[in-house]
Image (tube, rainbow, N blue to C red):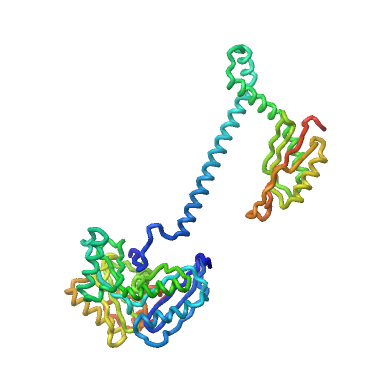
C-alpha cells in the first residue's frame, strides 16, 4: 500500500528553512569542489605539456636556431618553460627526498616537495601534530649539507584532523651540488 | 534563542490521555510521559489543556512537535477519484461540500486535509479549526515548531502498509469504543465508516464489518482484516470465522481514548 500523505499542517513551498540553508551550503561546497577539480585537471594538463616540451627541447632549440629571425614571443616563453622543466628534471630527486624525509622524522607527514632549480629553493608542504614539531623539522633540515636557510612561510590549523591538525609550508634554500 | 535541531516530541492526543515522547536526532526515545487531562474530559479542550501543561517550561527541549490525533477528534470522508480537476479554491469548496453533505453546517468551522497523492478515491480528514489553532498556539508558547498534525488512522495505515497486500481488505482501528473501518481495494480507499460500539468486543467489530458489507450491497470480496490500535488485542482472542486477520505493527504514539 502507498504511504498516505495527509497532514493538517500545510507544507510551505520552501519547506524547512534549515533544510534550505543546508542545501545552499551543500551546493556552494559542491561548486567549490568542482572548481578545484577543474584547476587540478588544467594544472595536470599543463604539466604534461611542459614535460613534452622538455623532452623535445633539443629539437625545439634546433628549430629555433634555424628560424631565429621569425621566433614568436609565445615560442620564446615556451622554450623558457621547457628549460625550467628540464632543469627540474635534472634535480637529484633521490637525495632531496632522502634529506627531507630524514629531517621530517615521525611527527611530520610530507605532502609536497617543489624545488626551484633556478632560485635554488625548495618548497616543502606537510602536516604536523603541532608548531613545535614543525620547528624541530626545520632544525633537522638545516643540519643537512644541502640546506642553508629554512623558514615556515605558512601554517594553518585543521581541527578536523586529530592526528595532524597543522598544515604547513616551509621554504628552504637548497644547493643540489652541496654535499 | 534556543536551538534544538533534530529533537522532536511526538504527542498522542486523546480525550482521556495525553502521551508525550521525546526523540533525539537519531530517532531514539529519550523520555516520555503520560497524563490524563484534569477537569472536563471528553472534548479536545481538556486534552489540549493537558498538552499545554506537559509542554510547559520547555522541559523536553524540543525543536519540533508531531501530534497524532485520536479519531475522536477527526471526521473522515472519501472524495471520488474523478473530481480532482479545478483550481485549489474550487477543490477546497468541493471538499467542504462533500463534508457538509455528511456532517452538516458544522463543517464551516473545520480544518480539512486531503491525501493529494492518492490515485483513486482520496481520503479527507477534518478537525475543528479551533483545535488546530489551539495546538499551534501551545507549540508557539512552548518554543516548539509544530511540524505535523496527523490522524491516528493514517499513522496506523502507514505503519502497517507493507503488510497490506491483499487485493481487498478492511483496515480496522479501534480506540476505546470508537471503531474506524475502511475498505481498501488495490491499495486504495473505497469506503470508510466511523462507529461507536455499544459493547467493545471482537464480535461487535465483526458485526460492524458485516453491516458495512451489507450497506455496500455485498459487492466487496474482502475477507482480509488489517487490525490496528486496541483492536489488535481484542481480535487476537476472537474466533474470526472466515476472515483472515493480519495484525499491523503498533503505531506510535497511540492516543489512548
Whether residue B30 sits left or right of residue B137 in the image: it is right
**Is residue B11 placed above or below B203 in the rendered structure?**
above
Which image quarter holds the C terminus of chain B?
bottom left
Horizontally, is B49 left or right of A97 in the view?
A: left
Q: B240 or B195: nearer the eye?
A: B195
Residue A114, image x, y percentages:
69, 36
Specify the quadrant of the image occupied by residue A110.
top right
Q: Is residue B144 above or below residue A22?
A: below
Snapshot quadrant of residue A53: top right
Q: Is residue A16 above or below residue B76?
A: above
B251 or B43: nearer the viewer: B43
Q: Residue at x 41, y 82 (%)?
A: B17
From where the camera sits, is residue A152 visible? yes
At 53% across and 45% down in the image, what residue appears?
A32
Towards the viewer: A48 or B4: B4
Residue B54: give x, y in percent of width and height.
47, 79
- Is residue B257 visible to us here? no
Q: Position of residue B91 (x, y in %)?
A: 24, 62
Residue B178, percent from left and from top: 31, 81
Residue farthest to the left, as pictured: B217
Query: Which quadrant holds residue A102?
Result: top right
Q: Is residue A118 above or below residue B255?
A: above
Number of residue marks:
0
Amino acid at each position: 500500500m502507498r504511504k498516505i500523505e495527509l497532514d493538517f499542517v500545510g507544507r510551505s513551498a520552501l519547506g524547512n528553512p534549515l533544510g534550505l540553508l543546508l542545501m545552499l551550503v551543500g551546493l556552494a561546497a559542491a561548486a567549490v569542489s568542482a572548481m578545484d577539480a577543474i584547476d587540478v585537471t588544467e594544472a595536470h594538463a599543463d604539466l604534461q605539456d611542459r614535460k613534452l616540451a622538455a623532452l623535445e627541447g633539443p629539437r625545439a632549440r634546433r628549430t629555433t636556431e634555424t628560424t631565429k629571425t621569425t621566433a614568436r614571443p609565445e615560442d620564446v616563453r615556451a622554450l623558457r618553460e621547457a628549460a625550467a622543466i628540464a632543469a627540474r628534471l635534472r634535480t637529484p630527486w633521490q637525495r632531496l627526498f632522502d634529506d627531507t624525509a630524514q629531517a621530517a622524522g615521525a611527527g611530520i607527514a610530507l605532502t609536497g616537495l617543489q624545488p626551484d632549480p633556478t632560485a635554488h629553493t625548495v618548497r616543502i608542504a606537510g602536516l604536523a601534530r603541532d608548531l613545535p614539531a614543525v620547528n624541530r623539522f626545520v632544525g633537522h633540515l638545516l643540519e643537512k649539507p644541502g640546506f642553508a636557510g629554512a623558514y615556515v612561510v605558512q601554517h594553518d590549523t585543521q581541527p578536523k584532523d586529530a592526528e595532524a591538525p597543522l598544515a604547513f609550508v616551509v621554504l628552504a634554500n637548497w644547493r643540489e651540488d652541496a654535499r | 534563542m534556543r536551538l534544538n535541531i533534530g529533537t522532536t516530541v511526538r504527542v498522542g492526543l486523546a480525550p482521556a490521555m495525553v502521551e508525550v515522547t521525546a526523540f533525539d536526532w537519531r530517532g531514539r526515545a529519550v523520555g516520555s510521559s503520560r497524563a490524563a487531562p484534569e477537569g472536563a474530559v471528553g472534548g479536545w479542550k481538556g486534552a489540549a489543556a493537558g498538552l499545554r501543561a506537559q509542554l510547559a517550561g520547555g522541559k523536553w527541549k524540543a525543536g519540533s512537535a508531531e501530534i497524532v490525533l485520536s479519531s475522536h477528534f477527526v471526521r473522515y470522508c472519501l472524495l471520488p477519484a474523478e473530481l480532482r480537476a479545478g483550481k485549489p479554491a474550487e477543490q477546497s469548496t468541493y471538499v467542504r461540500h462533500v463534508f457538509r453533505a455528511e456532517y452538516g453546517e458544522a463543517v464551516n468551522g473545520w480544518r480539512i486535509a486531503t491525501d493529494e497523492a492518492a490515485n483513486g478515491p482520496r481520503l479527507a480528514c477534518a478537525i475543528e479549526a479551533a483545535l488546530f489553532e489551539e495546538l499551534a498556539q501551545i507549540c508557539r508558547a512552548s518554543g516548539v515548531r509544530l511540524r505535523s498534525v496527523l490522524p491516528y488512522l493514517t499513522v496506523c495505515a502507514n505503519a502497517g502498509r507493507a503488510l497490506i497486500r491483499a487485493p481487498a481488505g478492511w483496515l480496522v482501528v479501534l480506540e476505546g469504543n470508537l471503531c474506524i473501518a475502511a475498505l481498501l481495494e488495490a491499495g486504495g480507499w473505497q469506503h470508510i465508516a466511523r462507529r461507536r460500539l455499544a459493547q467493545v468486543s471482537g464480535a461487535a467489530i465483526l458485526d460492524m464489518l458485516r453491516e458495512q458489507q451489507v450497506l455496500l450491497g455485498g459487492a466487496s470480496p474482502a475477507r482480509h482484516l488489517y487490525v490496528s490500535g486496541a483492536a489488535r488485542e481484542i481480535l487476537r482472542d476472537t474466533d474470526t470465522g472466515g476472515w483472515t486477520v493480519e495484525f499491523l505493527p503498533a503505531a506510535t504514539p497511540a492516543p489512548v481514548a
